[in-house]
Image (spheres, helix red, strand yellow):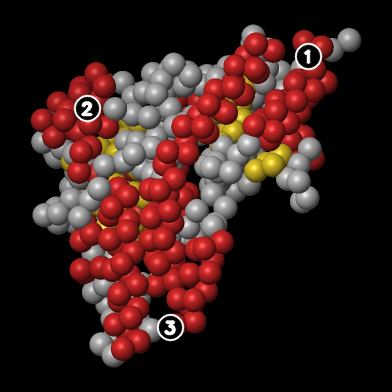
Amino acid sequence: MKNAIYLDYNATCPIRPEIIELVSSVMTEGGNPSSVHAHGRKARGRVEDARRQISKLIDCKPQEIIFTSGGTEANNMALNAVKGCTVMTALGEHDSVLAPANLNNVRDIACRPNGLIDLEDLKTALEAAQTQSFVSIMLANNETGVCQPIVEIAELVHSLGGLLHTDAIQAVGKIPVSFRDMGVDMMSVSGHKIGGPQGQGALVVREGLVIKPGQIGGGQELGRRGGTENVAGIAGFGLAAEMAGADLHRYLSVEDLRNTMEAELSDFCSGAVIYGANSTRLPNTSCLSMPGVTAELQVMNFDLAGIAISAGSACSSGKVKASHVLVAMGANEIEAGEAIRVSLGRETTRAEIDRFVEVWKKLYEKKSPRFAA
């Protein structure tokens, strides 16, 4: 669509032209990275170069990275990696964590209204566990942008003998992320959230931690994930990581735009709720409600106005429904069903935010019961 405004970066970040060019070139080269001839060695070099590029962005050792088909596989692999554990995860996690967790005897950890997990509830669960605990808590929520105190959580989990996985898929590329400093045992990341190709991700596993392979056969990724590597996708992911690291500073101006947008809408409509506003959030993410107007109606109207936003996660079946994340934070079904997610990116401009605010105000005046005759 001509002059379309894209404000759905948390769903997927538009791929960079340089990465399209690289991926195309690597696909032309061919070669299986497990082959010992020249073509195979070149492909292996592409994979290992990308591993180093990604490790630099997230501050881990290259050998700790296991390439996967995306963030969902990485999360599933983590949840299925250690047998015999008591699984614990927060109610506001992404479905790619909740679904595999629910296949186990999962202990749900409560969320507070500000979006942070209840650390006392987590401590109680850890102390009551009859086996080793495996805890999965996301670094930054994909819907609200709320950032969890992962360092503090890691210290608590480890003090009581547990293991900690964090889904850092939304955080990487938007804020500095250090696998080493957080002290987690596993971490999931994804390429298309930072401008790389879709269908490429990684699970980072602390050196020395032995896990169940994600899939077997072939022995790739040091025996932890069998199957021929997606060389082109991995190379694109690596370049995206390098470019994302160089662009981190740009999210300071993105945060200013987000804050300006929220301030203008809050001044205009005192009943608008900005979820997680009092917590540390990703600089680009805003989850806000329009009182009396369903999220589905908002998404459709913004789309007609040439503005792409979303309601909750983009990973469900295309349906707009009340967010389980907001319900976990204490919102009722009606309140959760009136919230949309606006996620900005490095290319977002002030003019685009001004246009979004203009459309939001007009829609509220037109559709909200407050203005009904």
Say if residue 336 shows up in the picture.
no
Tell me where residue 168 sits by quadrant. Answer: top left
* The label number, if any, that marks residue 196 in the structure image: none
Q: Residue furthest right?
A: 373
Check disc 1 and give the amino acid type: Pro
Check disc 3 and give the amino acid type: Gly
* The label number, if any, that marks residue 30 in the structure image: 3
Q: Which residue is mark 2?
A: 152
Distance from Cα at disc 1 to Cα at disc 3: 59 Å
How packed is label 1: few (under 14 Cα within 10 Å), some, or many (20 or more)?
few
Distance from Cα at disc 2 to Cα at disc 3: 45 Å
Q: Residue at x 33, y 81 (%)?
A: 42
Lateral position of residue 216 relative to residue 28, left or right: left
Distance from Cα at disc 1 to Cα at disc 2: 44 Å
Give the x, y percent position of residue 200: 43, 61
In terms of depth relative to the viewer, which is nearer, 4 or 364? 4
How packed is label 2: few (under 14 Cα within 10 Å), some, or many (20 or more)?
few
How packed is label 3: few (under 14 Cα within 10 Å), some, or many (20 or more)?
some
Lateral position of residue 79 relative to residue 318, left or right: left
Instruction: Find numbered disc 3 in the image and state the secondary structure of the residue it sits on.
Output: loop
Q: Residue at x 44, y 45 (%)?
A: 247
| Comparing labels 2 and 3, the label whose residue is closer to the camera | 3
Instruction: Find numbered disc 2 in the image and state the secondary structure of the residue it sits on.
Output: helix
Q: Is residue 316 above or below residue 120?
A: below
Q: Which residue is mark 1?
A: 369
Q: Contact, CB < 8 Å: mark 2 with mark 3? A: no
Whichever of callouts 1 and 2 sits on the residue coming sooner in the sequence is 2
Q: Is residue 21 above or below residue 295?
A: below
